[in-house]
Image (spheres, rainbow, N blue to C red):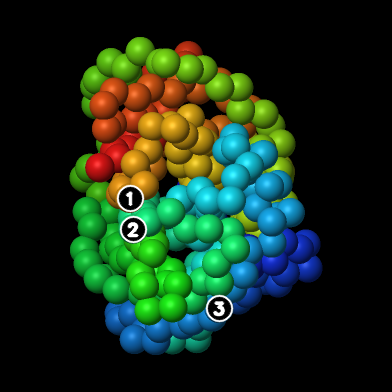
């Protein structure tokens, strides 16, 4: 998944589990179809506080009893992978492009709470570059819905008259600049279980058409929310669109203005992410 994520369990991510996820993804290369499966997958999870602290450190969050908004995404990703690698799923996993993510936090979620997670795919629809669909993940405590996540994926097909070229608006003045190290993909993989080869090394990224490894889109979103800590309400929706990949290493600018925020390349001004909090 190009900007996206191969995730972890509620326990700490393990190298064997990540390797199995990649092998399962490779096994989907022959998948073809026109309909999404109707299946909804579910499991109960508890949070490993050591794994949570490691995730917080990599993404820039303070260590706290309340889960970052992006952490249940990591907890639910094994279910997402299970869904995407089913024999009746219509698209190969590798090559899917993670183009957007929306998370709604209905209330703060404590690390001590047991979460009932569900995952389903819905809303297969046309896109000018192919087709896109949503993977919907939800977390409940008992019967209470506490968290929701919509990850939008694009399956490219054919050519498109809209190539994104043209004059770009001037990027906003950054309120902070971040040096993103070359190993951030491997560090995020270690705490999330996302071992997609495009994020690990230049050599493995080149096999998928990237000149260097790229940062995980969900790491970039998490880093933005970490920068906004202390300014977020108890209940909110945060939505992002992933733009151009962050080629590692990188120096990026973070900007925020009211409910909007963005990440762009400091040198070229190229956009990496735009988002809103409401």
Residue drawn where x is 27% and y is 32% of the image:
259
* Image marks 1 and 3: residues in contact by CB distance under 8 Å: no
Mark closest to the chain's N terminus, 1 or 3:
3
- Residue 106: mark: 2
- Residue 235: mark: 1
Mark closest to the chain's N terminus, 3 or 2:
3
Q: Depth check: 16 or 136 in front?
A: 136
- Camera-nearest label, 3 or 2: 2
* Image marks 1 and 2: residues in contact by CB distance under 8 Å: yes
Q: Report crowding for label 1: few under 14, some 14 to 19, many 20 or more residues within 10 A (C-alpha).
A: few
Q: Report crowding for label 3: few under 14, some 14 to 19, many 20 or more residues within 10 A (C-alpha).
A: some
Residue drawn where x is 71% and y is 36% of the image:
183
| Image spot of residue 174 (x, y percent) | 40, 16
Q: Depth check: 83 or 225 in front?
A: 225
Name the quadrant of the C terminus: top left
> How far, Cα to Cα, is label 1 from label 3?
23 Å
Q: Is residue 119 left or right of residue 213?
A: left
- Residue 44: mark: 3
Q: Is residue 241 visible?
A: no
């Amino acid at each position: 998944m190009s900007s996206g994520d191969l995730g972890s369990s509620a326990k700490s991510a393990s190298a064997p589990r990540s390797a199995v996820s990649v092998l399962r993804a490779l096994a989907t290369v022959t998948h073809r179809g026109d309909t999404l499966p109707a299946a909804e997958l579910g499991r109960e999870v508890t949070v490993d506080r050591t794994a949570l602290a490691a995730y917080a450190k990599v993404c820039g969050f303070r260590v706290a009893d309340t889960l970052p908004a992006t952490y249940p995404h990591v907890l639910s990703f094994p279910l997402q992978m299970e869904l995407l690698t089913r024999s009746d799923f219509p698209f190969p996993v590798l090559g899917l492009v993670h183009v957007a993510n929306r998370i709604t936090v209905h209330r703060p979620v404590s690390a001590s709470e047991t979460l009932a997670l569900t995952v389903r795919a819905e809303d297969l629809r046309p896109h000018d570059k192919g087709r896109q669909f949503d993977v919907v993940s939800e977390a409940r405590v008992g019967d209470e819905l506490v968290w929701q996540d919509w990850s939008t994926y694009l399956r490219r097909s054919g050519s498109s008259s809209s190539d994104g070229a043209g004059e770009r608006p001037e990027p906003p003045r950054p309120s902070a600049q971040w040096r993103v190290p070359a190993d951030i993909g491997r560090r995020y993989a270690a705490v999330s279980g996302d071992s997609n080869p495009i994020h690990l090394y230049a050599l493995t990224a080149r096999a998928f058409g990237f000149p260097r490894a790229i940062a995980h889109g969900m790491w970039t979103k998490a880093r933005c929310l970490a920068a906004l800590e202390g300014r977020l309400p108890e209940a909110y929706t945060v939505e992002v669109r992933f733009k151009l990949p962050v080629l590692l290493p990188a120096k990026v600018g973070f900007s925020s203005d009211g409910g909007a925020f963005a990440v762009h390349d400091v040198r070229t001004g190229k956009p990496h992410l735009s988002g809103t909090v409401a």
